[in-house]
Structure formats: C-alpha cells, structure tokens
Amino acid sequence: MTKRKTPPRDAFAAREAEKYENPIPSREYILDLLDSADQPVTHEQMCVMLKLTGEDQIEALRRRLIAMARDGQLISNRRDAYVRLDKIDVVRGRVQGHRDGYGFVILADGGEDIYLHNRQMRKVFDGDEVLVRLSGEQYRGKEEGAIVDVLIRNTTQLAGRFFNEEGVQFVRPENPRITHDIMIPFGAYGGAKHGQIVVAEITQQPDKNRLPTGRVIQVLGDHMAPGMEIELAIQAHGIPSVWPSDALAEAAVLSHEVLEKDKLHRVDVRHLPFVTIDGEDARDFDDAVLCERRKGGWRLYVAIADVSHYVPVESALDIEARARGNSVYFPDYVVPMLPEAISNGLCSLNPHVDRLCMVCEMNISDSGRITGYQFYEGVMHSHARLTYTKVGEILTGEGELSQSLREEYKAVIPQLELLHKLYQCLRVARDERGAIDFETVETRIQFNEERKIERIVPIKRNDAHKLIEECMLCANVCAATFIDKHNLIGLFRVHEGPTETKLTNLRAYLSELGLGLAGGDKPTPGDYQQLLQMIQDRSDGHLIQTVMLRSLRQAMYQVENHGHFGLGYEAYTHFTSPIRRYPDLLVHRAIRSVVRGTEPTTHVRRVDTAKAIPKKFIYPYTASDMVVFGEQCSRTERRADEATRDVVSWLKCEYLRDQVGAVYAGHVSSVTSFGLFVELNDLYVEGLIHITSLPHDYYRFEPAQHRLMGERTRKVFGLGDELVVRVVRVDLDNRKIDFELESADAIRRPKSAVKPKASKRGGAQSSGKNVTSKQGSGKKSGGERSNPATTIKSSGNPNSGGKKLSSPSALVVKRVDSKKPAAQKPSTKTATAKPAANAKNSKSPSAKNPAAKSNAGGKKTTAAQPLAKAPAVKPPVVKTVVAKKSVVKKVADAAASVMATLKKAAAPAKKATPPAKKEVAPAKKEAAPAQKAVATKAPAAKKTSAQKPASAKSKGEVDHGRKNAKTASKATPATVQSPAPKATKSAAVTGAKKTNDKRPVAKTKAKD
C-alpha cells in the first residue's frame, strides 16, 4: 500500500508520516481547519475539504475525530458535526443529583456549581462526567445549564429494592441522589422477591426519552436484616469493599512483624518514649508523639506510620488504595483503605513493638512558633497505647481515678505533662494567628446485642483531643512548607474564604441579632474568631457558630496552594494519616523522594548507609496526575461522608420508629423554604416540621435571617428556637422523620413587628392592618391553648383574596391561648360566620341557612369552628352599602356607613317584644331571594356567641367591621342587618362542620 502525502499546509505532516503508514491530518491541523470554518463540520464534509478518498484514510480520520472528542478537544452536535470545544461556552464537570430530581454539575476547577433541571437529569446518573452548555438563565442564584455530552458513565451497577408490581419489574436505587427506576426485563430478576435488596447491573444507560434497564446480579437479603443499612450504603455509594485477589496476594507476602533488614539505614528512635493517644475503639494507630523541653522552647517529635515502604507505586495495593481514597468509618464497622494485615498490623504503631515510621522533628519557640524542622525515615517503639479519656483524666482530674491512672502510667507521666505544657503554648499561638476554633458536638452510637441503638451519646473534647490536634497541625504545616520549598508537585489541603453571596447572607443574619463581622469584603480568620469569642457565652452561641460554619467553603485537595482559611495557614496539607487517607500517602512519597535523593537540603536527615533511590520509583507523578488524584480524593472523601450520614440516618429512623406519638424537646437546627429541621435535645436526632403543618398562618422563608415569618401574625420560627415536637411519621426507606409542633417555648418576633396590646378581656387588639378579634374558644389538639392572640384565617373560600365573596363575613375565627381555661361561660361576643355557600354540599336540608351553635352547658367549641349566621329579624331601617371596583379610598366611608346602620338597627331591636316565632316569618320571606331557609323551632332563649348587642362598640368589633367593609367592597351589593336578639340551634351547624372537616382550609395571605 502506497503512502499518501499529507497536504503541505499541515505543519505537522512529517510527524504524522513517521507515526502512521497512512498518515492523516494532525490534531493541530484539524483544529485550525475548524477554526476557519464558519459552522460545525461533519466527518463527511471534512473528508471533502481534505480531499480524502481512500477508505483507510476516511476511517482513520473518523477515529481521530472521536479521539479528539473523547479528550475534550472537540464536541459534536446532534448532526454529528464537530466544533472546537474551547470556542463554545461549555464546561466540564461531575453530576451531583438531588433527591427531588434536579441536580448540579460540580466543576473540576472548584467554580460555582451549575444547576441542572429535572429534564436534564433524565439523561444521566449521579456521578457521571458531562459537558454542559451555560444557558444564561439563573435558578436561585446559580447558572442553569444543559448537558451537551456525557463523557464518562460512572454507574455500572447499583443497589436498591426490587419491586414486582402487576408484572412490571424494577429496582428503586437506595442512593437518594439517583431518582431513576431501573427497569428489569422478565427473566433478568435473578430470583429476587418483591421488596428484597438487590444489586443490579446497568445494561442500558438512561436517556431523556427512556428509563435505564438492568439485570439483577446479586440478592443481598431482606430490607430489615441487621447490618443491611451498611451493605446498602456501600453498594449505593459505590464504595469498594471487596479486595482484588492480586492486592490480597501482595499483602499476604508481607511479614507480620518488621524485618531486621528493613530497620537498617534508618534513624533509630526506639529509645525515645513515644506514646499513641487515640479513641477507645481505635484499631489502627497512625501517629505517635513525644516532647522534650529545650532552651528557649521545645522539641516536638511526630512519628507517622511509614506506609510508603510497604505499598509500592502502582502496585495492586496502591491502585486499590487510590480507588478507595480513604477508610470509611461506619458505626461499629470500618471499610479500610488498606487490608487489615497492614492497617491494623504491620503499619499500625501498636504498643511495645518495633515499627517503621516517617518522623517530623520540629523546634518550637516559647511563643509557639515553628523555628525549624527535619524529616527522616526512622524505626520506633511505642511505650504506651493511651486513650483520650485516660489522658484527659490524668492531666486535669483530681480524684481517685486520676491517681490510679497516674500510677498505672507513671513511666510516661512526665512526657504527658510536657506535652500538655507545649499544647498550652501552641494554643496561645493559635489564638494570635486568628485560627477559627469551631466547637462542634460529635456523637457516638451505642448498640445492644441485637445491633439496635441503645443510646446516642455526645463525645466531649478534652485537653487530650486538643493536644494531639495541635501536634498534628504542626507536622502537617511542616509537610506543606517542605513541598513548597522543594518545588515538589504535591497535594495541598485548600480551604478558601467565604463567597460574596454567603458573606452577605451571614452578615444579614448577624445584623438581626445585633452582631457584626469585621473585615469588609475579605474578612480574615481572625475576624471570624473574634466573633466566636463574642458569642461564646450566649445561649444561642452554638447556632450562630453553625451559621458561620455554613458560610465557609468546603475544603479540597488541590495542586495549587491557596492556603487554609479556617486554620489561618498560608500552606497546609495532610501528612499524619497515611493508613486511612490516600493524599497523606502521596505526601509521604513526595517527602521520601527527597530523603532518598541526593539534593542537598537542611530539612531532611539521611543515614550514611542509605542508598539513593531514583525519584521515578518513589514519586513519578506529573502535574496532570496530581490534578486527577486531587479530584479523586476530594470525591471519595465526600462519598464517605455521605455514606456514613445515610447509615446514621437509617439507624436513627429505626430507633424512632417505635416512638411515633412521643413528645420531645428540641431546637431548630436548620430553616428551609419547606419547613424547620428540629434536632431533639437528648437524642441528637433530626426531623422536619413541614411548613404546611405550622399553625395559624402562611409563612414566608427569609434565607438571610434563617427564619420563617407569618404573613399576618408576624410570628417567627428561627434558627435556635426551642420547641416541643411530636413524632408523627418515620420513613425508613427515605431516611426521613416528620415532626409536628406540640408547643413553642420560644417564638421570636422580629423587631419591626408591632406587638398587639392585650384587651381588658384577655383578647388582643389590632395595632396595624392585621385584623384580630377577641372571641372564639378554639382549643389546640392535646387540650392546650397557645398564645392569647386570636388570629383570623381565610376560610379557604376560592372567591377570597380579591375576588367576589358570597358573603362579606367569609372568615373563620380562631383563638390561640397560652393556658388551659377553666369552665367557660357562654360567650356574648359577636362572631363572624362562614358563608352558607360553604355548606352547600351538606346532606342536611337545613344546611343552606346554618344557625349559630349554642354553647349551653358550658361546652367549648373547637378551634376553627365556623360560627353560623342566626335568622335575621327585619329591622325598621335597612341601609344598603353598594360596592364598586377600586374602592380602596372609600374604606373609611364604608366603615362609617356600617356603624351608622348598626346604631339605627339596635334601638328598635331592643324594644321588640313579640315572640321570636312570629318574627322569623318576615325575615324568612325577605331572605328568600338569596337562599331558601328551613325554619327550625327555637329552643329556650339563651345568649350565644351571635347575641352581642349591636350597641356595644368594642375595639375588636370596630376592626371587624372595617374588615367586613373591605371585603364587601369587592362583593356584590349586600344588605347589612342587625344581629338577631335570639338564636336558634339548627342541625345545619353540624352539617356545615362536617363539610369543613372533609376539605383542607387554604392558608391565604391576609390582605393589608
């Protein structure tokens, strides 16, 4: 086959001719060609432009275009036409789904997330890598995008529940971020039964027009089997948990103890009294510490397990450790990054045995500043395995237990006391540096023999925790400085400051509390710490701290160093936990490449007998490799957090499943547009009070202030409010717990709201445009009444809210009292009534003209009980108020007209002496045009809530009349009549009540 010369315009033709028997245009030439085109070019069009005729050349060009698209140089549209990717407004990132169906694209460069609509999410799974075109639209402050191409499909199998419903088989994923159901064809269900947990392999990826399909490859078991929650989390989040055979083979070759030949060519520090301090349930010990007092300061030794010695670069163990990224710590279960023979055995700094280590030796001044450091390979011998609890008791305790522990560990007590003094010195330096010191509450779940939660207990941080933390911070800072000073390509732990939006929201919230954050547009960690010190004695300090913490960005692993905002360091990395974090292992290799190199430096100590090792065998990574590793490790870290959170949520739901109906005290831990998240004080369990279950109002979400505010009552539910809640529902499948408000111990009112003045009769008077009334005896469920303010809610009439009303008094009166009343006398206050039209569907024939319900016998009406209109007595004078459109300016005139009518109607009504039975007839005849009433026999005369004399003019009634006048202004012409002196008890009341109970009452905004 003869060679065909490439066109002379291709500057890289010679290179291509050397590489291929049938050379094709170079990538650079193709990019230039597309640059000169005024529109996307298809494969066929490019073949014509390049005058390619041979089948081999045409096929080779097709493959090159596909490869360039795969590598992110080109992108194709729906017509399979290609265009340069850097010439269009697209970005690359990873999809992150949301349980509600929408999602985001997390950009690799750490930029602002891009919102994906539900329609876009139909094409992908959570975790897929995509190219997204920016639409220019905004959704809640985030740029909205459209998926142009799916570059990498990262979901090949998933775990979920198998369902067989009327012959349709599907798997519903347990990962809440994946909202697709996986269709299972007949015969591919693997013997699974309805409701069982299975693992499905994806055979066809999702598309915008079809659901994904798969086949069941493993049946895990029943949904409620003990330990199933962990298996589900592992499968749902794609956490590798099965060791490859080649990795296990490499681990099996290693000895159980350190070989003598491995101890050679290292600095021997076995004589130094190193100790480990960890939690009670720890099994892998990464770090050991030692401190010596020196003139003018201290010498701190931090010895870290030398994992890099046992895990060679690109070995099977290394590849699997990189895939896992980190160990995952579930309650009472661990998925380790390395096989247990290494993590808990050969590399773990267990007591009283020799272990290989990487030592960071630091000189620290009396002011707490690091003045010098050296790294070297060593061999150590731990003198004691201590716990945080024991060390805390030894250092600060004064009782018998402290004395007993001091006797038990007397050999290392001097060492612990030196470490404690050094910690106090480092603590002063931390405060001067302005590092942010958030005090968060961590919990530990304790199980019974059946692996059910027995209790959830908080973990209290003592000086032992803080001592080890400060020692590790020192070593990590030295490692970051070392990488930077020696121009190594490494991973830094980057934590940037708050974004402009989050900073604005934080300051808005603080201003509501009379607080402020200094620093202007770019506050420092010291500004945050100063605010933390100001709030440390406040009862809501921990909640303010939570809001401050949420204002900061998430820390990530990156090649470029941008400092660590929270800790106040210019450079920071992770060095101290290579057994459980892959980034730490990479940092060890970077340092070891210098220790075993030949470059002269004062920051390493080398043993003369140690041979130099070429860098390519220890640390052969490029900058692009490190970028990938940083993204991978940041992703696996988030994956572990989410999986752990899922398991804890499942266990807490299971714990509360038998507590439905129980009442607990809690506080608002988060406020969203759909409700309040409340954390139970003693259980550390979080649940939701949905916004629709909040009483007496329509609530508006104010994100900057972290609160919900009532539109009419101006009541506020905000972050930190102490509430009493009842458990109403537990959803194990979705890990959700629902609460309802039992009572509110502290409902805050914003400063701008006007507090209602209490009336003489214990009601509340309106002090603005919110209409209040003094009557009603509505009770809350549970027999308790809340706040002594009575609010008026819209009855839910579809004609309310500016449309025509069937009656000018279409309102429901509710009372909210704070104390349970004594036996109540029948009320004599005027009540408004729901329109008779609301009861038109009642089965009672008398429902069309409901009468007022008597309160005889001391019985109390229920909350939101609609009070019906009594039969009207024909007054001597009738005044008609005619409504017109846009009568807002005539509201005062309308109110005055109503009051005049009531005055004129009241005097004759008092003089009326004939029996009520004779007076009902004319009233019935007059009311006939509006509705047909069914007369009922009146009982003995008793005053009801509809019998307030018209001459009584309380403030509540004046406001009520104003409200009715406003409502009437948009209604049809209505006749205003005086109240009847007597009321009749009608069966229609019962009918109206049943009708209202069957439908929800709409929560509409009060009209100002």
Image: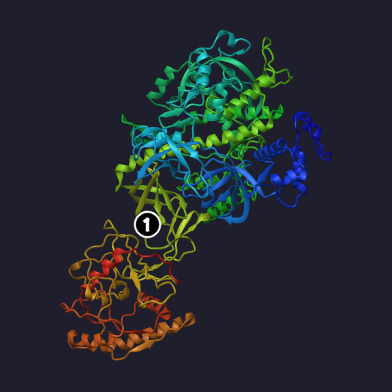
Dot 1 crowding, Cα within 10 Å, few <14, some 14–19, many 20+: few
Q: Is residue 396 left or right of residue 452?
A: right
Residue situated in front as seen by the camera: 117 or 558: 117
| Residue 12 x %, y % | 80, 35
Q: Which residue is mark 1?
A: 693
| Residue 634 x %, y % | 57, 36
Report the residue that reaches farthest toward the bottom.
Answer: 876
Which residue is depicted at the point 64% across and 37% down? 563
Residue situated in front as seen by the camera: 743 or 984: 984
- Quarter holding the N terminus is top right
Label 1 secondary element: helix
Residue situated in front as seen by the camera: 221 or 898: 221
The number of callouts visible is 1
Q: Is residue 560 left or right of residue 357?
A: right
Q: Is residue 863 above or below residue 686?
A: below
Would you identify the image quadrant in which residue 577 lies?
top right
Is residue 704 visible in the rendered image? The answer is yes
Which residue is depicted at the point 61% across and 26% down? 586
Q: Is residue 52 above or below residue 100?
A: above
Q: Is residue 496 left or right of residue 237?
A: right
| Residue 6 x %, y % | 80, 37
| Residue 371 x %, y % | 67, 26
Report the residue that reaches farthest toward the top.
Answer: 260
Q: Is residue 645 above or below residue 312?
A: below
Which residue type carries mark 1?
Ser
Is residue 443 visible in the rendered image? The answer is no
